[in-house]
Image (cartoon, rainbow, N blue to C red):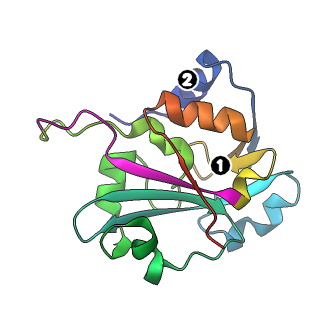
């Protein structure tokens, strides 16, 4: 069962992490969020859920303005060619739907019960170095009707508490 926004906030609070959440109308794309972002300081994200040809899953959280060359990224990452993960897989693994992909969805990445020897997270998490240069950084809190700001260090603490060691990568 996927964590709710409220459960995410309780988890962040238990970790002692400071966040500020801004309510807004639902946004589905980076372009739709342009007007909303002007009222919120910090780095704003775009998030990509990818799958390689071998079945490995990757979540990328990048600065909204960063260009990510997916065509060649697999060589750099040492994985199979990449494509976008199907919505059903996104919901199964990260508990969110397209348009709500977020780094906070790491809270839902639990080992699949049908993989007997799998004890760690299923998703490899990459975060853009350009995003980490901002403070705060902004993510949807599992819903596209709000944006939650968190410091880069606190976000890394959150990711690690979810069992992920983020890979900070300069995409540009």
Q: Is residue 43 left or right of residue 58?
A: right
> Is mark 1 in CB contact (under 8 Å) with mark 2?
no
Image quadrant containing the N terminus: top left
Across and down, in percent, residue 4 comes to: 48, 34
Q: Is mark 2 on a helix, strand or loop?
A: helix
Viewer-side residue, 77 vs 84: 77
Viewer-side residue, 28 vs 14: 14
Give the CA distance from mark 1 to mark 2: 15 Å
Instruction: Specify the segment rendered in magenta.
Output: 116-129
Judge whether 151 appears above or below 139 on screen: above
Q: Callout 1 environment at 10 Å: few (<14), some (14 to 19), or many (20+)?
A: many
Which residue occupies the extreme bottom position in the image?
71
Residue 25 visible in rendering: no
Q: In this view, does 147 lie to the left or right of 91?
A: right
> Hey, which quadrant is residue 172 in on the image?
bottom right
Which residue position holds label 2?
A: 11
Q: Which mark is residue 139?
A: 1
Q: What element carries label 1?
A: strand
Judge whether 5 appears above or below 78 on screen: above
- Pick whichever of labels 1 and 2 is earlier in the sequence: 2
């Amino acid at each position: 069962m996927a964590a709710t926004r409220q459960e995410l906030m309780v988890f962040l609070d238990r970790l002692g992490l400071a966040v500020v959440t801004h309510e807004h109308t639902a946004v589905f794309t980076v372009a739709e969020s342009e007007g909303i972002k002007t009222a919120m300081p910090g780095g704003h994200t775009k998030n990509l859920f990818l799958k390689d040809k071998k079945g490995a899953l990757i979540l990328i959280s990048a600065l909204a303005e960063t260009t990510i060359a997916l065509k060649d990224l697999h060589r750099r990452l040492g994985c199979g060619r990449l494509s976008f993960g199907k919505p059903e897989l996104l919901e199964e693994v990260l508990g969110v739907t397209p348009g709500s992909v977020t780094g906070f969805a790491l809270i839902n990445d639990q080992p699949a019960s049908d993989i007997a020897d799998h004890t760690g997270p299923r998703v490899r998490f990459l975060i853009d170095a350009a995003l980490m240069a901002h403070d705060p950084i902004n993510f949807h809190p599992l819903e596209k009707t709000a944006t939650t700001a968190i410091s880069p260090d606190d976000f890394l603490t959150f990711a690690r508490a979810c069992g992920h060691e983020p890979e900070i990568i300069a995409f540009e």
